[in-house]
Every structure is written in structure tokens, then in C-alpha cells.
Image (spheres, rainbow, N blue to C red):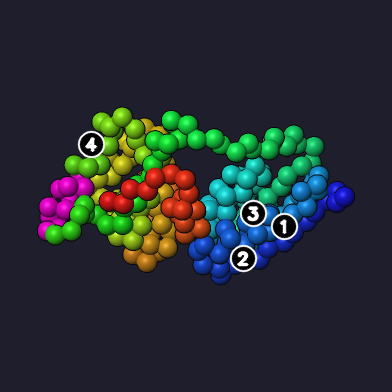
């Protein structure tokens, strides 16, 4: 039985979603009986740090972060060291609440096809209507041109912030933000990656594409 496990991952230069995937592989390969675990991950962009941190914490690991002057980030992922480990998660069983769960997939600033101006009017009305429904989406994913709705000059920014405050998880594609040079303008939600997005879209929740 292993008592101590150390793994070093150099993921600098890796594009989304590779940092999360490689970290997941490393954590999945760990000896389940190891009492003390340290995984260090080196990255060269903050979005990857946030994505890897969120994933590791979702697996009940503890994460600390250090940044060097040359913009190299080092994540230290740990489990053990006299810390009480969480109990194994029990599989969720479907019930009326989980059956009503759904997520929204928004990949453009307009709703529907046709006139762009009309599409923007419809999107504004749709987002403002969501809080009036009996059930809010668990998650709203903004991808491709949909990321323009979550940045500083978006006319729907306050509505989306209100949805986040009401309990919706707002995920914004990091690759899309980079492509449109919008990462510095993000004003709501958290930068996500294709690994996380793909997992949600293929998960048990209903997906509604707008």
C-alpha cells in the first residue's frame, strides 16, 4: 500500500481543454489507497489555472496557487496530510427535482434565425423572462458569438448578472473569448473549457439550445 504519492505535471503551452484532461488523467491514475498525495501542475495562463482548480476541487482535492514573475502558475493539488477525507459520493437517484434540471446553450447574441435586430429583441425578452419561470436553468453556457452577451458592452449584462445572483451557474467559453479578444472584458460568470462544457452537454440534464 502506497503511503505517499508525488506527481509533477508540466502543462505549459497546452491549449484548452488539455490542462484539465491531463490533470484528470493524473488524478484518476492515483493509488486510491495512498494516504498522502501531492500533484503539482505548471501552467502559463490564468484561465487554465481556474479551470484546473475548479475541476480538482470538484473531485474533493485541495488546491493552492503560486504565480512567478514570468507568469508561470504552479498549482499544488493535495489530499491527506492528516486532513479528514470526504466520504465517497453516493450516486444520485432521479427524483422530481433532478428530472426538472436543464441547462441553456447560447452560441449567438440573437435568438432564432432571420433578422438580426429582431433576434436581439427576442434574446433580450427571453433572458428577462427566465426569472419569471417556475424553474431556472442550472447552468447557462455561452459559446462562440454567445460570449458577446457576457462582456462589458453587452446590453444584456445586468440581466445575466441577475440570473447568476439567482443561482444560475454562468459558464463562458475561454477559447471563444480568446478568439474574439474579449477575455479582459468578461463581466459575469466564469471562464470555462471544452472538457467541462462537453461533460455538461452529454450529462443527464436536459439541454435547451437558444
Q: Which badge, 4 or 1, comes first in the chain's sequence?
A: 1
Other residues around mark 4 within 10 Å, as few (<14) / some (14–19) / many (≥20): few
Residue 145: say if magenta: no
**Residue at the location (68% across, 63% down)?**
9
Task: Report, in whole angstroms, how far the alpha carbon at label 1 lies from the one at label 2.
Answer: 17 Å
Q: Which badge, 4 or 2, comes first in the chain's sequence?
A: 2
Q: Which residue is mark 3?
A: 75
96 displayed left or right of 15:
left
- Magenta span: predominant SS is helix
Q: Which of the 4 quarters of the picture holds residue 184?
A: bottom left
For marks 1 and 2, give the one nearer the viewer. 1
Read off the magenta span.
115-124
- Percent coordinates x, y for residue 147 in the rendering: 33, 55
**Residue at the location (60% across, 58% down)?**
73
176 displayed left or right of 9:
left
Q: Which badge, 4 or 3, comes first in the chain's sequence?
A: 3
Can you tell which mark lies on residue 129?
4
When the figure is inspected, residue 81 is found, relative to residue 201, above or below; the finding is above
When the figure is inspected, residue 28 is found, relative to residue 97, above or below; the finding is below
Mark 1 in CB contact with mark 2 (< 8 angstroms):
no
Q: Which residue is mark 1?
A: 29
Q: Nearer the viewer, residue 137 or 190?
A: 137
Q: Provide the secondary structure element on which disc 3 rests.
A: strand
Task: Report, in whole angstroms, how far the alpha carbon at label 4 lies from the one at label 2.
Answer: 42 Å
Q: Nearer the viewer, residue 95 or 151?
A: 95
Amino acid at each position: 500500500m502506497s503511503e505517499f504519492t508525488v506527481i509533477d505535471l508540466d502543462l505549459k503551452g497546452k491549449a484548452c481543454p488539455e490542462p484539465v484532461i491531463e490533470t484528470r488523467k493524473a488524478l484518476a491514475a492515483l493509488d486510491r489507497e495512498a494516504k498522502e498525495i501531492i500533484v503539482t501542475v505548471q501552467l502559463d495562463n490564468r484561465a487554465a489555472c481556474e479551470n484546473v482548480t475548479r475541476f480538482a476541487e470538484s473531485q474533493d482535492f485541495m488546491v493552492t496557487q503560486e504565480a512567478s514573475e514570468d507568469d508561470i502558475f504552479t498549482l499544488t493539488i493535495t489530499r491527506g496530510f492528516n486532513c479528514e477525507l470526504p466520504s465517497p459520493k453516493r450516486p444520485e437517484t432521479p427524483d422530481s427535482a433532478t428530472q426538472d434540471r436543464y441547462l441553456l446553450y447560447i452560441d449567438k447574441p440573437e435568438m432564432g434565425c432571420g433578422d438580426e435586430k429582431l433576434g436581439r429583441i427576442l434574446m433580450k425578452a427571453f433572458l428577462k423572462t427566465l426569472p419569471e419561470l417556475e424553474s431556472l436553468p442550472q447552468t447557462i453556457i455561452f459559446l462562440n458569438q454567445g460570449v458577446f452577451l457576457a462582456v462589458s458592452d453587452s446590453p444584456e449584462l445586468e440581466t445575466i448578472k441577475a440570473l447568476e445572483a439567482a443561482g444560475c451557474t454562468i459558464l463562458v467559453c475561454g477559447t471563444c473569448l480568446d478568439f474574439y479578444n474579449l477575455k479582459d472584458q468578461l463581466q459575469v460568470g466564469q471562464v470555462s473549457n471544452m472538457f467541462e462544457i462537453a461533460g455538461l452537454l452529454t450529462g443527464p440534464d436536459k439541454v435547451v439550445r437558444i
